[in-house]
Every structure is written in C-alpha cells, then in structure tokens.
Amino acid sequence: MDQNYIAPASALKKLKKARNLSQTVYLYGATGYGKTELVRQYLSGRRYTYLSCEELPWEDGALPRLEPGRQKCRVVVIDDLHRLKSEELRREIIALEERADIWLILISRSPVPTWLMPQHIKSVFVVISEKDLRMGRSEIAAYLESRGIAYTEEDMRLLEVTAEGNAYILHHVALRMKEGLSPGSELHAEIWDAFAAYLENVVLVRWDSDLLEFLMQVSVVDEFTLELAEMISGNLHVAALLEQAAEAGNFIFQEDGTYRLRPVLIDALRNRTLKIYGTERVKDLKYNAALYYEMHDEVVPALRLFEECGKTERIKNLLIRNARMNVGIGHYYELRHYYFNLDEQEIADSPVLMAGMSMLYSLLMDGEKSEYWYEKLKAYTANARGGVRREAQSRLTYLDIALPHRGSRDVLAVMKNIPALLLDKGNCLPELSVTSNLPSTMNGGKDFCHWSPDDTMLAKTVGPLVERILGRYGKGFVKAALGESRYEKGGDNYEVMSLLTRAQVEAGQGGTMEIAFAAVGVRVRLALLQGDSPAARELLASFEQSVKENRAVQLLPNIQTLRCRLALYEGDMDIVERWMKTAPDEDREFCVLERYRYLTKVRCYLANGEYTKAQALLEKLRYYAE
C-alpha cells in the first residue's frame, strides 16, 4: 500500500474508541481498501504482534501466552483472517479474544464469519466495515496534495465516483495523473482493466480450486440464484460453495435470493474462464444459463445468451414465444432489435410473428409499418387452412382490439363480433392486457374514457361479454372500470371503494395481478383524496408484497412510480430523488409503454422547478396521445 495513504476519519475514530474500551476490532473490506495500512499507521510507534494467515504455519509461541499478573495490555493484529481454515487455530483465536491482557485486531476481506459470530455477539466487537474504509472527498484531496498532484473540481468529482474510495485504485490514478492524464472514461477503463488483472493474477490464484472453478462458471451471468448456479455448473453443493465464497471476501452480495459479484471481479473471472476453459466451453456454460432463463420465461437474458453462444434457431423460437404474449408481460420493445434482425420471409411464414411485428411497430408509433404487417397477416389468413387459419384469425382479431395506434372507438363493435368469429367455433382469443401494467383500466392499455358517461349501462349489457373475451383479465375488470369511472366523476366514496375492493377480490380468484393493481391504484388515489396518506402507503406496500410473492415483476416499476407520486403529495423529496435515478431516460429513447412513468417524471420536473424539461417531455407525450 502507498505510504501516502490517508486513513478515513470514521475508521480511525472507531479504532480509538475500541482502544479506549479494550474492545476487539473486526476490520473488513475488499482488496485495495487499505485495511492493513490503516492499522499499521494507527499503531505506528507502538509495539504489537502482527500475524498473517497468508503465512501459516506460524512459529511456536507466535500467539502471546498468558502471563498471570501482567498489567500492561498487549496488542495483537491477525491479518488475512479469511484464509484461516484450521479449527485448532480458530479456537486459539477465540481464547485469545477472551483474555483481558490482549487487545485484538482482526483483519479480513469478509464480514464476520459464522465461526466467529457467537464470540462477536458475546463480546460485541467494534466492526469497521468497507464503508468506513472508503476514502472520502477530504481524504482523496489530502492524498493528491501529499503527492504534489494538482486537480480541478471536475477531477475530484470524477474521482469520487470512479475510484469508489478504493486506495489501490486511487494510487494507480495518481501515478497516471503524475504523467499528465486527467480522470475520465479513458483513464477509468485503463485502471479498471489493471485492477481486474491484479485480481486475476494475485487474488484469484489464492482461492481454493473448487471455489474458483465454481465462480468462474457462474461468472457467465451478471447475477444468479441457487437454482441457476446449479444449472450452469452442474454442482449440487452450491449452497456450501456460496457460504465459502462469503467467507473468502467481501465480493458477493445477496438480496431476496439473488447473488451478485462485484463487477470488476466478474471481469477478472471471465478473463480467467476464457483462458482456462476456452471459447467452446464458455459457450456451453452460457447455453446452460440460457436454458434456465427460457424455462423460467425470462426471455431477454435467454435471447442474449443464445445469441452469444450462436444458437440462432433457439432465438427464433423464443421470439415466436414472446410474440404470443400480450404487451403487458411480453418484451416487445426490449427485443425489438432481435425482431428487426429476422428476415422478412421468416416473419411472413409465421402468423404469430406477423402479429408480433404489427404490434411492435404500433408501440413504436409507426402506424404505416404496423398496418403493413396487419395486411400481410390478413392475406395469409385468407389462404390458410385448418388450425393455422384459426391461429391467424385469432391473431387478426387480437390486433383489431389491441393495436395502440387504432385507438378505442371501434373496439366495442369488434368485441360484439368475436363470439361468431371465434368463441362459438371453439377457438380462443390470444390473451389481452387491458392495463399495460398501469394502475388504471379506463386509461391503461387503451383509452376507454369515452365509455364513462354510459358506464352503468355498458357494465350491464356488454360487461359479461367483455369478461368472457378477456378470460383471466376479465375477472374483476368490469367492477374495476366501473369503480374508476365513478371515482373520476366524483361519485360516492363508499360506492367507489366497494366496487374496487370487489374487483380486487375477483382478480385474486383466478384473475391477474394487473387488474388488481388497477383497482389498488384507484384505491390509493381515493385514500389520498380523503387525506389519509398513511393508509395509501400501507395499502400499496401490502400489494407490492403480494406482487413479489406472485412474481408479477412486470408491475414493480409502476408500483414504485405510484409510491413516488405519494411522496410528491407528501413533499418527501428524498424518495422523489431516489426514484428519479431509476426513471427511464426519455432523451435516450421514448417507449410508449413507459407513459405512466413519463407522466410521473413530468410531475417531478415541475416539483424541482425544471420547467423546460417538463415541457419537452410533455411534448413527446402529446405526440403519442395525438
């Protein structure tokens, strides 16, 4: 470590506190965060025993023996604790920690391991985490000044973001700045590659071979579950290996059953995997991962991996499978580049793909190309026979109802003809999304607001037909739409709540979470209207938990968006700011399926006084609306 290293104030403060109280210190962080150097600087000028688990076996008597009657406390530093496998030495360290004549400092790359946890709970260690070890703005500035390096405010801003407080990275940046380079994307990429190479050639080679092999295999994906890791590696001892990985270093993170590795470590592992396994073996690993994603209907990562391992036939099959889905759960927009790469004849040979292309172009606001594929499908249907004709006819009828650019004025007439065209002949209509994952039925997948003046009459006359046509999406739909219509017209709150609650119950009985979300969304607005924002928050939180349990993940972005709207009403700008970091960037690409989030973003712009941005986004939304 660089001798000019500046120890973070928060870490030094914890060390001093622990020294005064003679509490054991457990200090951990990933490679390069200055763990050992921090302790070395703090203990400079003092006598202490230093032992590293990288240098086992230790000499006899390396650990201080108990001396009865000794008054002065001795300092013992044990470094690289993540490398310690000996049960006997672990017991000796625990015994050492219990002695009153020893102030113990433990340094590791991982959080407190399971074998040490009971002692931690018993004695209450002072834990200095990686967060404490990150060099902040003041430490970075002091470090650069100690090296005689001039910097600008922009340099400092970039260093704070790109160095991530890592002393090793900052040392490399300083060397390059000495040579005249400035912080930026080029230097960041260079340092990133150098750090990845250091991890590959210095850190990875010290890991146990079974752990390294496992992590190399799962590095073909950015994140994984236990099940996915087993599928990729073919290893049935994944849980034990992940526990071993957690104790090897602070590089693996788990949230809701999903594991992630540090990005720079993934790069190091992938470099080594390619060198050790070769291209074909890496393709096999990616193919295993792609099959898992395909089996779990995670089309986007499956397609990416099939493309990377050259399985073109699998790509076409997946695109057809995705085109069978409605726009609420399908990935039309995300996969548009894959669809555009298909040959026109490939598309023309499949009624599902033709319908999918018509829908995709409509979502992209290209009505002319959407109608082109609609007409191609219509001509195909006229010449088809048997089951293929029934499939094509059902797709045509689906497009008659669902194409966004056609509006909703003629939808009711189309629906009235459906029983004669399809249902009475034993056919079924492809599943429709009537909300597009928005918390609204009246203005979700389509704009049905013009039905509102006659809502009661329509609910009684065509409501049963609509529910029959929509299938699962029909459960609770009529009551949700009627409740929303009454709410928008200022109807009786009790009646509105009654309709929406019943809609939510019906949707939960064999229906869809999308219709339930539409009902919940209006219930949240009703609670706000009545001045009861805590009830609105509680209702939304409860529904979000239900969505996660039912794995209706497509609803989560708009649930978070509704939470942002609640925060706007309550003036909680911290939540608003966090949401804005995850909001879609309308200047990068404009997707009509994101309109609920765009409209919320307009409100955020207005709340922050960014009126020009709000107007620009509204103009894009106006273009879509027209």
Image (cartoon, rainbow, N blue to C red):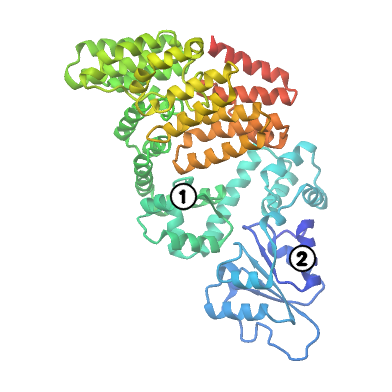
Q: In this view, does 239 lie above or below 170?
A: below
User: Is any part of residue 360 visible from this angle?
Assistant: yes
Q: How far apart in space, not on screen, are marks 2 and 1 (Cα)?
A: 36 Å
The residue that appears at 27% across and 21% down in the rendered structure is 350
Find residue 275 and report its horizontal and vertical position in percent. 43, 52
Mark 2 Cα-neighbour bin, 10 Å: few <14, some 14–19, many ≥20: many
Q: Earlier in the sequence, mark 2 or mark 1?
A: 2
The residue that appears at 60% across and 46% down in the rendered structure is 192
Q: Nearer the viewer, residue 256 or 129?
A: 256
Q: Which amino acid does label 2 sit on?
A: Leu
Q: Is mark 2 on a helix, strand or loop?
A: helix
Residue 305: image quadrant is top left
The residue that appears at 52% across and 38% down in the rendered structure is 543
The answer to whether marks 2 and 1 mark residues whose Cβ atoms lie closer than 8 Å is: no
Q: Nearer the viewer, residue 576 or 425?
A: 425
The quadrant of the image that shows the C terminus is top right
Q: Which amino acid does label 1 sit on?
A: Ser
Q: In this view, does 421 lie above or below 4?
A: above
Find residue 188 and report its horizontal and vertical position in percent. 64, 42
Residue 575 is labelled as: none
| 443 left or right of 569 in image | left
Residue 15 is labelled as: 2
Q: Nearer the viewer, residue 583 or 278?
A: 583
Find residue 386 and report its horizontal and vertical position in percent. 17, 19
Q: In this view, does 426 lie above or below 107?
A: above
Find residue 320 and report its horizontal and vertical position in percent. 32, 28
In this view, the mark in front (2 or 1): 2
Residue 26: image quadrant is bottom right
Return the residue at label 1: 219
Query: Outermost residue toward the bottom?
Result: 68
Q: Is mark 1 on a helix, strand or loop?
A: loop
User: Is any part of residue 587 visible from this angle?
Assistant: no
